[in-house]
Image: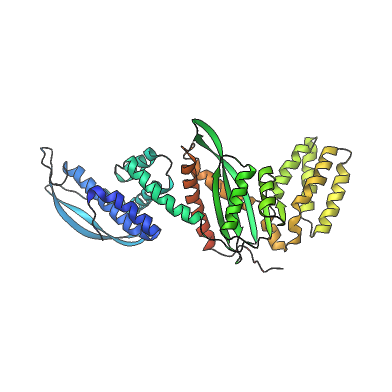
């Protein structure tokens, strides 16, 4: 293991993680753990190494190696020894809890790159280390390079594309505004799910969605057979401009919700929901259109606005009826992306308000990389060859 000068330890640690990613996590934990133990020894002794002071209670007496088994493998740490006072590192006594705390501290320096004060406070609480704002900012810059590389990675054949957006609060121009987080999920040619890209924009305006989709094309996305999304005007216009001719599936879940705004009586809502669900569950397009025609006629007198809305909008949710049944169930809503958005929210609500769009993009990208890697190394989501 490489021994680093105390004053440069954190800088070297950041460089190690930036260069080797999580493959270097075991060594990073070793370095950080050794520093924690040395700081703890200095506190017990009442003096830094070689420091002359009347408050000294004992003396440093070298190090003794100790191998500790962790979930990142066996690592060997240098346990500080003392003379004249009893000492044993509390981090070793805590065992697995310490390992989790150390890994969390390292992760927080990266993923929680929201507030340098917050990162420094978390790291001091868990590891006893004071980290300057400049060091945390440097770590953020190193991470940004890795995240940007992931966001710009080449794509390939993406038969199915799912699009959605959520909003987070950021500071912009001295004001607090809602910022749009645009996310794209794809089903690859081997049937795996993959998070294709993420972008942070001031709104869901057409220009932002158009740039986002155009970037997916530039990165090599091709052979898209279907796009699933909600009916946002900006997204709709951008999709037609960038992906002309690609069939569009409007999210059936959102259609069900939208329909309720046109139901004139609360007592009718359950029946309307059942009728729309029957249309969506029809075995093929022809059957779905017959059921829709019957539903429109059924409400033509009692709820004319609902009937007109159904006739105009429900067909947008029937595109998946031309797909194999197994594909239809997976692609008729944006629910998969809604679950991703919930995971983003779980992580971003810790911050509440982001200081700028860069910090928001950093955290969201880090969360999405984790999810995407799990998907891409997991089981097949769809059998693309199913007919």
In this picture, is 20 found above or below 367? below
Residue situated in front as seen by the camera: 270 or 233: 233
The quadrant of the picture occupied by the C terminus is bottom right
Where residue 176 sits in the image (x, y, percent)? Answer: 52, 32
Residue situated in front as seen by the camera: 88 or 224: 224
Left or right side of 197 for 245: right
- What residue do we see at 51% from left, 44% from top? 346
Residue situated in front as seen by the camera: 366 or 261: 366
Residue situated in front as seen by the camera: 331 or 135: 135
Where residue 217 sits in the image (x, y, percent)? Answer: 60, 57
- What residue do we see at 51% from left, 52% from top? 368
Where residue 80 sits in the image (x, y, percent)? Answer: 20, 53
Res. 319 visible in picture: yes
Q: Residue furthest top?
A: 174
> How has the structure been colored for display?
rainbow
- What residue do we see at 76% from left, 58% from top? 321
Left or right side of 215 for 5: left
Left or right side of 178 for 18: left
Res. 107 visible in picture: no
- What residue do we see at 10% from left, 41% from top? 52
| Tag count | 0
Q: Quadrant of residue 160?
A: bottom right
Where residue 51 sits in the image (x, y, percent)? Answer: 13, 43
The quadrant of the picture occupied by the N terminus is bottom left
Left or right side of 166 for 255: right
């Amino acid at each position: 293991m490489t021994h680093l000068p105390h004053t440069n330890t954190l800088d070297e640690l950041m460089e190690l993680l930036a260069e080797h990613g999580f493959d270097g996590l075991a060594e990073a934990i070793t370095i950080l753990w050794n520093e924690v133990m040395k700081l703890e020894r200095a506190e017990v002794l009442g003096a830094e190494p070689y420091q002359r002071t009347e408050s000294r209670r004992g003396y440093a007496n070298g190090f003794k190696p100790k191998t500790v088994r962790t979930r990142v493998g066996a690592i060997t740490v240098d346990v500080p020894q003392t003379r004249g006072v009893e000492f044993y590192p509390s981090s070793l006594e805590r065992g697995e809890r310490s390992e989790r705390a150390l890994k969390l501290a390292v992760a927080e320096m990266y993923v929680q790159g929201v507030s340098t004060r917050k990162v420094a406070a978390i790291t001091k609480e868990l590891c006893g280390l004071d980290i300057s704002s400049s060091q945390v900012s440097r770590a953020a810059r190193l991470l940004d390079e890795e995240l940007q590389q992931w966001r710009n990675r080449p794509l390939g054949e993406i038969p199915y594309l799912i699009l959605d957006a959520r909003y987070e609060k950021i500071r912009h121009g001295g004001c607090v505004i809602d910022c749009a987080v645009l996310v794209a999920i794809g089903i690859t040619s081997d049937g795996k799910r993959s998070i294709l890209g993420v972008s942070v924009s001031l709104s869901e305006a057409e220009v932002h969605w158009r740039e986002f989709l155009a970037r997916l094309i530039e990165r090599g996305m091709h052979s898209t057979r279907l796009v699933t999304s909600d009916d946002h005007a900006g997204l709709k216009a951008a999709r037609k401009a960038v992906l002309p001719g690609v069939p569009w599936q409007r999210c059936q879940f959102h259609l069900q919700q939208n329909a309720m705004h046109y139901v004139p009586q609360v007592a009718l809502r359950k029946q309307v929901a059942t009728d729309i669900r029957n249309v969506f569950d029809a075995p093929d397009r022809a059957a779905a259109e017959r059921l829709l025609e019957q539903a429109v006629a059924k409400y033509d007198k009692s709820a004319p606005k609902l009937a007109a809305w159904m006739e105009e909008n429900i067909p947008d949710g029937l595109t998946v009826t031309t797909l194999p049944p197994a594909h239809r169930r997976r692609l008729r809503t944006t629910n998969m992306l809604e679950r991703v958005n919930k995971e983003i929210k779980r992580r971003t609500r810790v911050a509440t308000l982001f200081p700028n769009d860069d910090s928001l993009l950093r955290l969201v990208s880090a969360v999405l990389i984790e999810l995407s890697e799990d998907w891409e190394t997991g089981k097949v989501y769809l059998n693309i060859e199913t007919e």
